[in-house]
Image (cartoon, helix red, strand yellow):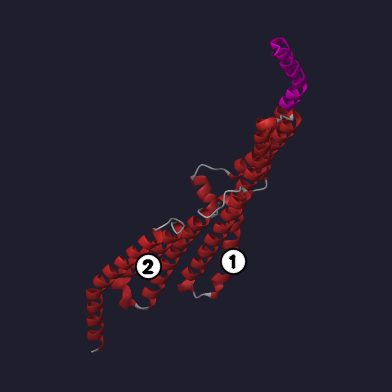
């Protein structure tokens, strides 16, 4: 028969023995929070003082940050603060040295926290780097095009930016162990749609500037290209789901037939107009 008094005595003894570790863990977390707050504020002020934030706010990514209510100096200061606090939490968990299932879960959480922070940091700094590199290369290639074709240089810059952002997101997700068979097609689909819209706008504008006779059908051509890239992008996004590929293929065929039917009178009218001009 189990001696209840002995069990209670052992429990009390375990609690008493754990008190130093618990107090040490609390002190470590409190110090980590205090140090993290002080260092985070110092980094925040430093970023503002050196003018990095002011330069960043003038970029497209910086304007997007501002529009979403984010502040670069606050973000960087917050990341530094979070990093220090995470180190304190990891150290505190090691001090507690909890065994069993709870200890295993705590250890796994402690091991994952640096990955989570690293992924967030990759996205933030990666977006800044992508914007800087795309803008820099865009300025380098702009003199290669005549003044009336500068939109092509802007298109190439935007395509490079989209590709870099996709790479950065994939790298961040891999770091956070969140990548997989669903994530890759999702990002690929959005890249296809974004790149397609950028390509379509520039190509249609360039063609209509050089060939005024195509202006009447420019809107139709833009709609067709938008729809094509949208269908391809959606197909890429849902490619991993069973049966979706066949559905997208059927929709594509139906869309192609409908466009061909609509195109007949437009092509006839355009041909008739061009034949009158030549005659």
In the picture, residue 271 is in which quadrant? bottom left
Q: Position of residue 111 (x, y in %)?
A: 68, 41
Res. 45 visible in picture: no
Q: Is residue 255 magenta?
A: no
Magenta stretch: give its range: 1-27
The numbered mark, 1 or 2, whose residue comes first in the sequence reads 1
Label 1 vs label 2, nearer the camera: 2
Q: Which residue is mark 2?
A: 225
Mark 1 and mark 2 residues within 8 Å of each other at the beta carbon: no
Residue drawn at 67 percent across, 47 percent down:
50
Nearest the camera: 249 or 259?
249
Nearest the camera: 122 or 141?
122
**Gap in angstroms between the C-alphas marked 1 and 2:** 27 Å
Q: Position of residue 224 (x, y in %)?
A: 34, 67
In the picture, residue 161 is in which quadrant? bottom right
Q: Is residue 124 above or below residue 2?
A: below
Quarter of the image containing the N terminus? top right
Nearest the camera: 258 or 46?
258
Looking at the image, residue 178 sits to the left or right of residue 33; the answer is left
Q: Secondary structure at mark 2?
A: helix
Looking at the image, residue 249 sits to the left or right of residue 278; the answer is right
Q: Residues within 10 Å of mark 2 (few under 14, many from 20)?
A: some
Residue drawn at 57 percent across, 43 percent down:
71
Q: Which residue is mark 1?
A: 137
Q: Secondary structure at mark 1?
A: helix
């Amino acid at each position: 028969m189990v001696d209840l008094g002995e069990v209670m005595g052992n429990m009390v003894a375990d609690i008493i023995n754990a008190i130093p570790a618990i107090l040490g863990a609390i002190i470590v977390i409190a110090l980590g929070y205090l140090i993290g707050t002080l260092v985070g504020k110092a980094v925040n002020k430093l970023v503002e003082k050196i003018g990095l934030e002011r330069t960043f706010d003038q970029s497209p990514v910086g304007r997007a940050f501002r529009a979403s209510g984010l502040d670069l100096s606050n973000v960087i200061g917050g990341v530094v603060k979070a990093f220090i606090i995470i180190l304190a939490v990891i150290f505190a968990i090691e001090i507690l040295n909890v065994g069993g299932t709870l200890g295993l879960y705590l250890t796994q959480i402690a091991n994952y926290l640096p990955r989570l922070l690293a992924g967030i940091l990759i996205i933030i700094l990666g977006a800044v780097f992508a914007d800087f590199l795309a803008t820099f290369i865009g300025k380098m290639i702009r003199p290669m095009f005549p003044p009336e074709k500068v939109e092509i240089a802007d298109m190439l810059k935007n395509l490079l930016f989209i590709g870099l952002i996709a790479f950065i997101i994939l790298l961040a997700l891999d770091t956070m162990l969140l990548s997989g068979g669903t994530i890759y097609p999702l990002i690929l689909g959005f890249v296809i749609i974004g790149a397609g819209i950028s390509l379509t706008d520039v190509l249609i504008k360039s063609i209509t500037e050089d060939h005024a006779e195509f202006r009447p059908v420019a809107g139709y051509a833009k709609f067709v290209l938008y729809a094509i890239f949208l269908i391809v992008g959606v197909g890429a996004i849902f490619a991993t789901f069973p049966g979706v590929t066949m559905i997208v293929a059927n929709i594509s065929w139906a869309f192609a037939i409908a466009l061909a039917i609509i195109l007949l009178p437009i092509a006839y009218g355009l041909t008739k107009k061009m034949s009158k001009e030549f005659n």
